[in-house]
Amino acid sequence: MNDRIVDALRCRERTRLDEPTTDVIQGTLDMLILKTLSLEPMHGFGIARRIEQISKGVFKVNPGSLLTAFQRLERAGFLDSEWRQTENGRRAKFYTLTRAGRKQLDIETADWARRVSAVTRLLKADG
Amino acid sequence: MSLWRQLSRGLRVLARRAEADADLDDEVRHFYEETEKSYAARGISPLEARRLARLEVGDATVIRERVRDYGWENLVGTMWADLRLATRMLRKTPVFTAVVVLVISLGSGAVTTVFSAMNSLLLRPVPGVADDGQLAALQPIRSDGLLLQQGSYREYAYLRERSRTLAEIAAWGKVALTIAGKGEGATIWGNLVSGNYFDVLGAHPSLGRFFLPDEDRTPLAAPVIVVSYAFWRSHLAGDPSVVGRSVLVNGNPFTLIGVAGKDFHGIYTGVRADAWVPVMMQPLLRPRANLEASSWLWMFGRMNDGITTAAAQKELGTLLSSRAEAEGEPRGPAGFRSMAVFPFSGLPGGEGVVMFRLIAVLLGTATLVLIIAGVNVGAMLAARSATRGRELAVRAALGAGRTRLLRQLLTEILLLFTLGAAGGFAFAVLATAALEQLPVPANIPLQLELSPDARVMMFCLATSLLAGLVFGLWPAFRVVRTDITARMRDGAQTGGSGRNLIGRSLIIGQLALSLTLLVAAGLFVRALQRGQQMDPGFTMSRVLTTTFEAESWGYDETRSRAFYASLRDRVAAMPRVAAVSYTSRLPLTGGSSTEDIEFDGKTINVQRSSVDTDYFAALQIPLLRGRAFLVSDNAQSQRVAIVNQSLSRRLGVEGGVLGRTITFLGKPTTIVGIVRDTKYATLGESTPPFAYLPLSQVWQPTQTLLVRSNEDSEWLGPAIQQVVIALDPALPRPKMSSMSEATSIVLLPQRAAAIVTGALGLIGLVLATMGLYGTMAYSVQRRTREIGIRLALGAQRATVLSMVVREGMLLTGVAIVIGVFLAGIASQLIEGFLFNVSPLDAATYVSMSFAFLFVAFVASYLPARRAALSDPLLALRAE
């Protein structure tokens, strides 16, 4: 009896500890956010929708991951934020790319391109 | 930039947690609203749209928790929560908490007290001195390698003028000063200092000014004086207007130009100076010393930037050697050509090393006590975590990770040890105050300042926390490592015999160490007793003494002689006074004067003192042959000396020494008597060759009066004081003390060691006994069911009692064997302090072991009795 409770509790513990997976390729979320913001300042939901639309639904951004990424990028000095009105008259937090963020985007884009071409070459060589 | 952002944003979140949370919630809600809207736009009913939006975005709380987890500030939050929980847990078991904190306090207090003494004697910068690491102490090295403390003014002036590595060199010497300002005069220790003394030290006056360069150029040109803040408060009524006024110093008018900084008492740790006078006033204040040639000045200097002590030492050595060659100085063993350069400290080179060794031994001993305390606490924490297993299992099951649990336990342990550190610090404050009260002889201005400061506080906290990590962490690891579900099933029944073995060895270790300390303390007490009963070779009882610094009253030799003679005659005329005499050096006060004598082509190094006619009668030292000094031995007559047996033997003409002539202090001196050997400087010494000279021929201005009376007489001291005042009302009232008080310093090391090891040993015993009691009580508690069954099956209560007591006694027995063995080794280290008490003194070992056995018996009897008296029914139901 006691054991069954414990097992149930353990089960719960395991699911809680499992990391929720994002649909975005690991490590690219920051770059996608920076890229999206390089066009214009945007609020959180706007960024999520833009990524989804432009990728034609391939990437779906989990709000938890997105908001955590904002925290991280802001602390690192790549983003600034302020509360503004949306066109619908709702108050929302708008994120702006800083100069450091722009530089970071260039670095990450270059890095990404390098990796993609490397992976592509590897795949071609195989065929 | 980003570090600044990390810090500022984190702090903002910490300061306004609620606002940050509300913002975050608002952002999440924005996601809901927009998602809901897009579903609604596709024509889905509002209710369904809301459900779908929830599904897609996910649970708001989960999102919020994830985002909140980011950032260092969350760690602060969790730590605060841990601390609150820890406080709550400790308050739930107040007795346990109190005992643990008490045990840590005792251990930490012992270490902190010793460290505090070490700090103020060795580590702390001298109060009132601004040392930026460029100050250096200079000490002459004799040609035969002996490190001296003082040099002469000639060397000082020579080096000061020529040194390039040292920007400035200052010098100072001791002088007794009698200062009369308002009211009765007071004799204090002062320093004769070079004009740059205060500047080199970087000291600042609290009133007035220090010396000008001009005030230290020409002998006797500037009678100016600076006094200490304490002296100004106590003897000059703290009156600011005295600055610039005249005071009498040794009977001469001086101008008081300043008051030193509040804590400044010279730069020799432990000996306080209360006034400073330019060294050029030396001929007036210390006329017998030869300013140029006598070695009486301590030196220190300020090194130029980038100069090391080694470089300075090299340069000074070169300078002194070239001077010796140029001037053709005689190069006896006493001449010196080099100068040791040390980093500046309040203790001269040689003494610092001795002090350091002594304190290192004490610190090691105190660390043993801390280890005993730590082991004890570790055992208590382990015992408690056994009973807390279920609580921890529940928390783990509810989702607390292992690191989180460990962090929680660690917080509790560190909280306990922090409280213990606070207790230990309080302990150290009290203990150092008690140590400062140790009796020291009245005629030395010893001032021990041992109280803890901020550095000691940091040390106390750091050692406690370190002990916490070392001794507290393993029980915590054990708990967390154990399979949590197993714990949940079995409750508190776990704990195999393996752990028990470790626990038992720890208890044995503690008991053995504390026995070692107790034996050491016992040996010191025996040495103290032996020292007090030891026959010094003269009779101390019914002898009153006081020391006069006639030079410090401005008396010249004629006036001093007249004073000493009239005082002697008047005291000798008092009823029941048996003998009155003077000596230049009171025996058993630790010091000696040595001199080379020549006889028959041999050179013998002897100790000497100058004494008055009735000296041997006053101290009842038997005259074996020849005669005592007579009034007829005067400055004009043939020089005479009286030798002790050892010197008589060394001269090598047993029986024929009387009437022979030796060369003493450069003059032919006839031996007129032989007296029995006595103790001279210390009780532990091997008897040196010793010679007495008459004060009338070898004059000393500083003399100690010795008055032997026929019966104990309370009135004699005040009567002598009255005679002194009657002879010269301007003199300070002399401090009278019995001979045994005056010589108490001779047993100071034994007394201090007995007190310190005794205190540490007792603390160790208390801790170890508590540990034994705890172990036995715990073992009885774990065996409740077994004991219940035994009793229920008809076992006699006496059988149960002896079963438990036997277990405790077995541990104690093993501990005694180990402890005695360790003490046998450790006591060899202190043999030199023991006055021939054997380091393996059987009486000490046996008595300490029995005392120990008794205490251990009580510690195991009490839990045993509880077990024997327990109700079998209750015991069986206990689970």
Image (tube, coloured by chain):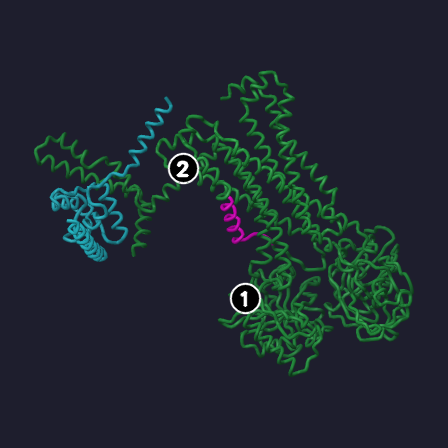
Chain colours: A cyan, B green
| B354, B130: nearer the viewer | B354
Residue B633 appears left or right of B260: right
Residues shaded magenta: B450-467
Chain identifier of the residue bearing label 2 in the image: B
Q: Is residue B27 magenta?
A: no
Q: Is residue B219 above or below residue A87?
A: below
Q: CA distance from mark 2 to mark 1?
A: 56 Å
Q: Position of residue A97 (x, y in %)?
A: 20, 53
Q: Quadrant of residue B121?
A: bottom right
Are discs 2 and 1 located on one and the same chain?
Answer: yes
Residue B91 in view here: yes
Residue B568 appears left or right of A99: right
| A82, B814: nearer the viewer | B814
Categorize mark 1 by other alpha carbons within 10 Å: few (<14), some (14-19), many (20+): some
Prevailing SS of the magenta stretch: helix
The residue drawn where x is 53% and y is 71% is: B303
Name the element at disc 2: helix
Q: Which residue corresponds to mark 2?
A: B405
Q: Which residue corresponds to mark 1?
A: B204
